Amino acid sequence: MRGPASCDAVSCVRAPCAAKGERVKRFKKVLLVSVPLLVIAAVAVFVSGVLPYKVYVLHTGSMTPTVPSESAVIVHEHQYHVGQVVTFTEDGQTVTHRLISINAAGLITTKGDANATADPWHPPKSDIIGGVVATMPKVGYWLVYLKSPLGAGSVLLAMLAIWQIWAVGSSAQPAVAPTPRRRRARHRRRMRISLF
């Protein structure tokens, strides 16, 4: 008679597999919840203005190849120098171009890297938001997409669909493999048949 601690070969093999399956399910749930929360938290921190950084999207190719169109740039507010790519406001529009010079009157001259000539405007240096410290190619497209209600809704629906697929996949029962005893019994029968 077996004690409570003993187990047959099949249950001893299945127990670690079941525990591993539970760990994988738990990991998937944690991942599916934590990644969107981290993204939302990062966006909230940037939007709140707690950090001295802002994110802007380039819609034109005037800074190509340095900063391609549809890129996102991270701007360090109030930190810039001549020769650096800066983000500034001009006639209510946000522009990201290279800072060429600042004259004695405090007016700036800028130029897009893809443009042949300097920009025709000369805003005051107080209109400079800050210098670009990092660029993220093609990320700007996704930021613009996620800002729209349709884009945010589609991402939310995609996350819900993935959640449901994982839930259905994890609830499906795996096929039971034949036990080692059955295999041995079949093998013995074949041996007996071949002996006669």
Image (tube, rainbow, N blue to C red):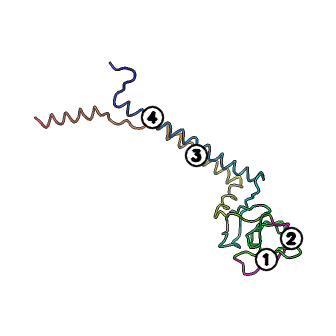
State the residue position of label 3: 161
Residue furthest to the bottom in view is: 116
Residue type at mark 2 is Pro
Left/right placement of residue 51 relative to residue 173 reads right
Residue 181 place in picture, x, y as percent: 28, 31
In primary-sequence order, the first of circles 4 and 3 is 4
Q: CA distance from mark 2 to mark 4?
A: 67 Å
Residue 75 place in picture, x, y as percent: 74, 62
Residue furthest to the top in view is: 1
Element under label 2? loop
Residue type at mark 4 is Ala
Q: How many marks?
A: 4
Q: Which residues are magenta?
A: 114-128
Report if residue 65 lies within the magenta region: no
Element under label 1? loop
Q: Magenta stretch: dominant SS? A: loop
* Crowding near the residue tagged with mark 4, few <14, some 14–19, many ≥20 C-alpha atoms within 10 Å: few
Q: Residue at x 73, y 69 (%)?
A: 85
Residue 151 place in picture, x, y as percent: 67, 54
State the residue position of label 2: 124
Q: CA distance from mark 2 to mark 3?
A: 50 Å
Left/right placement of residue 38 relative to residue 82 reads left
In primary-sequence order, the first of circles 2 and 3 is 2
Residue type at mark 1 is Asp
Which mark is nearer the camera, 1 or 3? 1
State the residue position of label 4: 18
State the residue position of label 1: 119
Q: Which quadrant, please, contains the N terminus?
A: top left
* Crowding near the residue tagged with mark 2, few <14, some 14–19, many ≥20 C-alpha atoms within 10 Å: some
